[in-house]
Image (tube, helix red, strand yellow):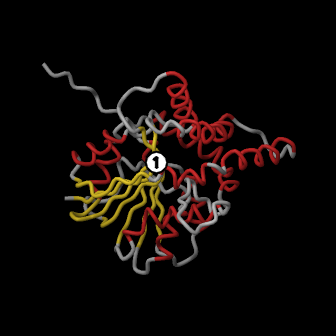
Amino acid sequence: MTTLVPEPRVTRQDVEAMVRYYVESGPDYQTWSPGFNMHFGYWEAGMNPLRREAMLERMNRKVTESFEGCENVVDLGCGVGATARSLAQRSSGTRVTGVTVVPLQVARALEMTPLGMAVDFWEGDYTHTRFSGGSFDGAYAIESFCHGPGRDKAACLREAGRLLRRGGQFVMADGFLRTSEPLVGVLAKCHERICECWSMDSLPVLPDVLAGLRENGFRVTGVEDISWRVAFSVAHVPFVTARFLVRELIGRRSRLSRERRNNLLAPLLTGVVGLARRHFGYYILRAEKV
């Protein structure tokens, strides 16, 4: 007899915790990126590894380059829209729709978007959007599906598959656990604390996500390990954190809430976990809706 395991779902408490985290800590991301790129960067030969914003923008391009020329693209977990604006600015004729569960991010994204740019922002759950099936020919998630439920992020992948037309392209960029093998010791504690800090129940697990893509109507077309390229921007974390603490604590500008403290701790722990190459890697996954 087969025992069915209930699929993890986004609860109201999960959403409230995530919204609270981004409301409290969201403004602090400007210390990391003046353009509010809320992700790590991509280094390639010829780039100055000290220029963090350039690496962040290069990650935007790396994730979205296959969508240039597409008519309608959806950003699932858009933050305040930096990646969406980057794509829309580069690709004439492409309309980008950003989805985020955080109302404050929608308001900030609209403020930061130049009048007339082909970008829309909607408040909503990216596992259950308001859009009709087959509405988009491209979809991407950059360091956002990690917030989705479960290790395989099945609910996220199912909605991405529903939204895409046949032949539509999907790209996911994130930190992944490499195997389903349980973490132990210090690594397990670090992973647990990272998830607590960033309102996640687990980092995505690579083989589980790949299986989830296939189960939800995708053909996987690319699995690219870019861990070492991302490492150049991760190396900025301790210095940015130190500068932030000096400014906030010595300058006594504002109170460091629990969410803001978590936002300082999680990137540092991510750097520790990232050194365990057997267990952790940063990947870009590409897939086609069939």
Q: Quadrant of residue 271?
A: top right
Q: Residue furthest left?
A: 1
Residue at numbered disc 1: 282
Say if 61 sits above or below 102 in the image. below
Q: Badge 1, how many Cα within 10 Å: few under 14, some, many 20+?
A: many
At label 1, the amino acid type is Tyr
Describe residue 125's horizontal placement relative to residue 222 as left or right.
Answer: right
Q: Position of residue 77 (x, y in %)?
A: 46, 53
Q: Relative to 49, does residue 176 appear above or below in the rendering? A: above
- In the image, 45 versus 79, the foreground residue is 45
Rendered residue at 47%/70% (across/down): 87
Left or right placement of residue 155 versus residue 263 in this view: left
Q: Could you tell me how many numbered marks the image carries? A: 1
* Residue 212 in the figure: left or right of residue 18: left
Give SS at disc 1: strand
Coordinates of residue 169 in the picture (x, y in percent): 30, 63
What's the residue at 47%, 45% (across, down)? 175
Q: Residue at x 28, y 60 (%)?
A: 164
Query: Looking at the picture, how far across and down is residue 108, in whole percent?
Result: 60, 60
User: Which quadrant holds the C terminus?
Assistant: bottom left
Quadrant occupied by the N terminus? top left
Instruction: Give the left or right position of residue 196, taking residue 150 as reference.
Output: right
